[in-house]
Amino acid sequence: MKIGIIGGGSIGLLFACYLSRKQPVCLYVRTNEQKKLLQEKGLIFVRETEEQTNWIEVKLYSEWRGMEDATLIAVKQYQLDNMMGILNKYSNAGKSIVFLQNGMGHIKKLDCLAGNIYVAAVEHGAMRTNGNRVLHTGLGTTKIAPYRQSDPQFLHWLDSEYKDMFPFIMEENYENMLLKKLVANAVINPLTAVLRVKNGEIIENPHYFQMVLLLFSEIEQSLELEDGQAYFKNVRAVCMKTAENQSSMLRDLEEKRPTEVDAILGYILEKAGEREINTPVMKALFHAVKGKECNVEG
C-alpha cells in the first residue's frame, strides 16, 4: 500500500516518519524550499535520545493526483479551502482520504469528494523545528472514524501494521470523536496562546484554572454536551499528559503563523449564536487570539 501525506508541518512530518517505516510514502509540501531541503538532507525524526534520518519521496501540493491507496490531509484548517479544488478533481472512488485537522469546521466541506472519506483526531505531540526536522514530544494515539463510506481492509491494515509503534484506534461515530477533541482544543489552545504558558499551567495555576472553569462552562452550554463532567475530565487529562508542551495555537503565534481559532472557538461561537447563548469569555479569548494574529501579520 502506498500512502500520500499532504502537509509538511509538524503532524505531516511526524506521520511521514512513522508510516514510511512500513510502507512507501510520498510527502506533498507547499514550497520548493522545503521540497529541496527534504530531498537533500532527508527527514530527521527526534524522540527523546533517538534521532534518525528518513528518505522519502517528496513532491509539491500541486502534483498530487490521488494515485496513492490512501492520502492523509495534514494541512491546517485555514489551508483546506485552497486544497479542496485539487482534492475534488482527483479524489478517486477506489481510494481513501483521511483528514487530520483540529476542530470541526472542515466537516461541511467533505461531501464533494469521492472515495472513502475518514476524519481523525490526533493525540500525539509534535513540533517541527525545521522544514525537515520533527520532534515527537508526546506519544499518543490517532483516533479515526469513517465520514462517508469505509474500506474495512484499510482500517484493518492501519490497526495491524502500526498498533505497536504508532497506534490507530477505530471509532464508529466521527461526531462524538471530534467533539471530544474539539472541547479539549477549545479550552487549552486559546488560553495557553493568550497567556503564553505551557499546557499544564492552566490547571496548576489557581487563577488560570478559574478561567478554565468559566470557559468550559460556556463551551458546555454552547455545544449542549450531554455529559459535561466526562468532557471536563478529558480536558484535565490532556493538560496533565501534555503539561510540558506548548499548544499548537501558541506555537503558531510564536512562529508568526495564522492559528486555527476560527475552526475551534469560531465554530463553537456559531453554535452559541444559533442557540442564543451568551459567551463573553469565549468571545474575549477569540478576539484576543485574532488580535495577536493581526500583530503577527503586520
Image (cartoon, grey):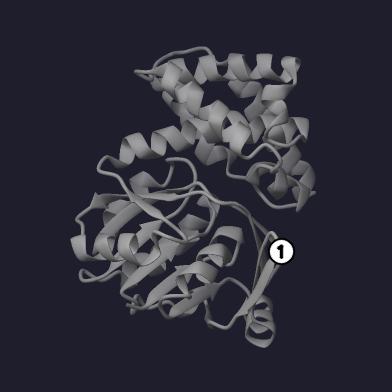
User: Residue at horizontal 38%, vertical 68%?
Assistant: 71
Residue 126: x and y, percent? 62, 55
Q: Which residue is mark 1?
A: 49
In the rendered image, the residue lying farthest to the bottom is 40
- Residue 273: tell me if it is visible: no
Number of marks present in the image shown: 1
User: Residue at horizontal 24%, vertical 64%?
Assistant: 115
**Where is the N terminus found, in terms of image quarters?**
bottom left
Secondary structure beneath dot 1 equals loop
Q: Answer above or below: position of 12 versus 227.
A: below
> Label 1 crowding class (10 Å Cα cut-off): few <14, some 14-19, many 20+?
few
- Residue 190: tell me if it is visible: yes
Give the side of residue 163 with respect to residue 285, left or right: left
Residue 208: x and y, percent? 72, 20
| Quarter residue 107 falls in | top left
| Quarter residue 195 falls in | top right
User: Residue at horizontal 46%, vertical 13%?
Assistant: 277
- Amino acid marked by disc 1: Thr
Q: Answer above or below: position of 17 versus 285.
A: below
User: Which is nearer the eye, 63 or 6?
Assistant: 6
User: Residue at horizontal 23%, vertical 52%?
Assistant: 148
Residue 40: x and y, percent? 68, 87
Q: Answer above or below: position of 134 versus 273.
A: below
